[in-house]
Image (spheres, helix red, strand yellow):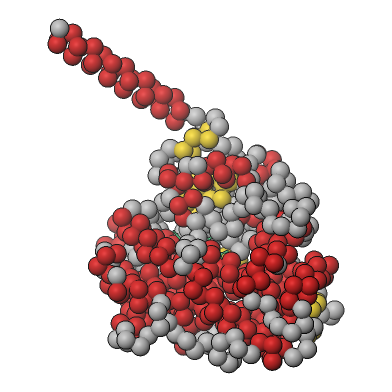
């Protein structure tokens, strides 16, 4: 009897094995999503295709459908350009797409395998994300509002003093905030501060090292063990490690006096977080790179949109005037009463997504979508630019229309899927801080000023520069005409003075 049971069990196991392997063989014989023939030039592109024009990719989506495969030699990149496909692939299959491409030069050598943005998923990645979550999750970021208010107030005062340098003021806001959150610095930073210049240099170097084709070690990983191979990569790592260590050492040496901040938290909870000193040093050090240029760029884009679309700007100002009246400045408590501010920000995010053409993920196993297979190892990118123009979701998607985010009662719609902050398990952990920064800066700037174009130098809203993984508008001129009397007086009381 027991032999019969054993034989039956073996037969059942064989049947299961046969059907699952046969099925997976059949499934993996499915083709890749369609795409143009021949070699695509990834040669000089950055991690995010910055050299390929957004329009060029959009034309491919129109021709081949929502998911397009591009090939260059042995490299395959799958690019997603529509919202439903992004949900189906990047979100639902998020666990299979949490890896990054193998960047030996940028990640393993320059970053010592510790820069979270470039790390593969795995134990270290999960520990770092958990540590970030403690300080950047929605309920934690409420604590940063006073700082954000204070630095946003400084933006207004800077714009009054020196309107031509509006982009610089946005950068100063974003940089000061990150340094305060990370290291408890209270003095607002300056963009020519040697420390900020040094951090920016590190970012540029990583940006260079991440370019496909820039370093042969990405194709031939064994080269990294050749002692004379591209020594600058090791020098860059040593320099940034020394810089990040010195920033964290300052916190460590002043634990009694330093303001509560991410760095202090990391040091206090190092054991529980199971992080080595250099891991936490890098985690704190790379916050600036991830959160500073992106936030500054988004604030500049709000200014650009206001100058380019006066009617949309007026609609926000009308609501601000109704809610705030003439004897105070907007603050975080006005958030719920100012849905038009939020709608203006969402539309700016959509109109000019800071994430540009998207950041690379990599399939850690075969991913199936419709009748296609994206094989393990393929680089997969959600193309923010095209997804934000998805005709199925956004009518007249080239128009700047904040009303599309409002329901009939003037409230923010809560059912529009949106990927401004990336996808799946790699979604931007700083999104709640960023949203609050955008809210307070937009509310204060549009309360304080009417922004117009300079007639002799019209803005070209299609012209961008690539900054690290994000895009930023080319420098542009705008006029900031005061629309409130006594701005200095009304801003008094929001943090220490400028
Ligand atoms: C408007 C401002 C911002 C935008 C548009 C933005 C957008 C993004 C995007 C698109 C990604 C890549 C997601 C993906 O791979 O799918 C990302 C990653 C990241 N962002 Fe942001 N971000 C912003 C602000 C911030 C801030 C303020 C912080 C920190 C305080 C931050 C920290 C990070 C980090 C650490 C990552 C890497 C996450 C990972 O690879 O797992 N970001 N962000």
- Name which residue lies at 70% across and 46% down: 393
Q: Is residue 207 visible?
A: no
Q: In this rendering, would 354 be left or right of 273?
A: right
Q: Is residue 183 above or below residue 19?
A: below
Q: In this rendering, would 138 be left or right of 458?
A: left
Quarter of the figure with the N terminus: top left
Q: Is residue 325 visible?
A: yes
Count the marks. 0
Q: Position of residue 399 (x, y in %)?
A: 78, 57
Q: Position of residue 445 (x, y in %)?
A: 70, 78
Quick one: 421 or 256, which is closer to the camera? Answer: 256
Q: In this rendering, would 148 be left or right of 162?
A: left
Quick one: 459 or 136, which is closer to the camera? Answer: 136
Q: In the picture, residue 412 is in which quadrant?
A: bottom right
Quarter of the figure with the C terminus: bottom right
Q: Is residue 4 above or below residue 66?
A: above
Quick one: 235 or 304, which is closer to the camera? Answer: 304
Q: Position of residue 404 (x, y in %)?
A: 75, 54
Q: Is residue 53 above or below residue 300?
A: above
- Name which residue lies at 66% across and 87% down: 491
Q: Position of residue 95 (x, y in %)?
A: 42, 45
Q: In the picture, residue 299 is in which quadrant?
A: bottom right
- Name which residue lies at 66% across and 65% down: 336
- Name which residue lies at 41% across and 77% down: 261
């Amino acid at each position: 009897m027991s032999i019969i049971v054993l034989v039956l069990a073996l037969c059942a196991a064989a049947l299961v094995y046969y059907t699952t392997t046969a099925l997976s063989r059949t499934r993996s014989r499915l083709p890749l999503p369609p795409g143009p023939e021949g070699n695509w030039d990834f040669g000089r592109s950055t991690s995010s295709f910055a050299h390929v024009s957004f329009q060029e990719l959009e034309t491919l989506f129109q021709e081949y459908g929502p998911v397009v495969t591009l090939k260059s030699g042995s490299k395959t990149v799958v690019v997603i350009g529509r919202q439903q496909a992004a949900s189906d692939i990047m979100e639902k299959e998020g666990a299979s797409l949490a890896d990054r491409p193998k960047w030996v030069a940028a990640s393993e050598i320059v970053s010592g395998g510790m820069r979270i943005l470039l790390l593969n998923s795995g134990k270290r990645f999960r520990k770092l994300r958990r540590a970030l979550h403690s300080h950047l999750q929605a309920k934690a970021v409420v604590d940063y509002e006073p700082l954000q208010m204070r630095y946003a107030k400084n933006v207004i005062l800077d714009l009054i003093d020196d309107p031509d340098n509006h982009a610089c003021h946005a950068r100063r806001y974003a940089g000061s905030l990150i340094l305060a959150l990370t290291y408890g610095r209270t003095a607002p930073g300056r963009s020519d501060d040697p420390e900020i210049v040094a951090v920016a240099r590190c970012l540029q170097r990583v940006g260079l090292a991440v370019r496909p084709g820039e370093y042969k070690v990405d194709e031939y990983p064994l080269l990294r063990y050749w002692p004379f191979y591209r020594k600058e990569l090791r020098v860059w790592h040593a320099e940034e490690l020394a810089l990040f260590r010195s920033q964290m050492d300052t916190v460590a040496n002043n634990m009694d006096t330093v303001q509560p901040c991410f760095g202090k938290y990391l040091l206090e909870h190092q054991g529980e977080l199971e992080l080595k000193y250099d891991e936490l040093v890098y985690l704190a050090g790379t916050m600036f790179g991830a959160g500073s240029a992106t936030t500054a760029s988004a604030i500049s884009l709000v200014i650009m949109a206001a100058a380019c679309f006066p009617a949309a700007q007026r609609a926000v100002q009308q609501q601000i005037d109704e809610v705030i009246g003439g004897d105070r400045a907007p603050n975080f408590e006005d958030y719920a009463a100012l849905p038009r501010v939020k709608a203006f920000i969402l539309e700016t995010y959509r109109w000019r997504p800071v994430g540009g053409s998207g950041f690379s993920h990599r399939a850690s196993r075969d991913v199936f979508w419709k009748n296609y297979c994206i094989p393990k190892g393929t680089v997969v990118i959600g193309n923010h630019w095209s997804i934000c123009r998805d005709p199925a979701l956004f009518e007249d998607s080239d128009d700047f229309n904040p009303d599309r985010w409002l329901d009939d009662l003037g409230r923010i719609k809560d059912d529009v899927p949106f990927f401004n902050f990336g996808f799946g398990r790699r979604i931007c952990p700083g999104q709640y801080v960023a949203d609050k920064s955008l809210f307070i800066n937009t509310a204060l700037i549009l309360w304080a000023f009417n922004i117009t174009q300079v007639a002799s130098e019209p803005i070209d809203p299609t012209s961008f520069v690539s900054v690290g993984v994000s895009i930023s508008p080319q420098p542009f001129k705008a006029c900031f005409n005061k629309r409130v009397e006594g701005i200095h007086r009304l801003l008094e009381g929001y943090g220490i003075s400028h």
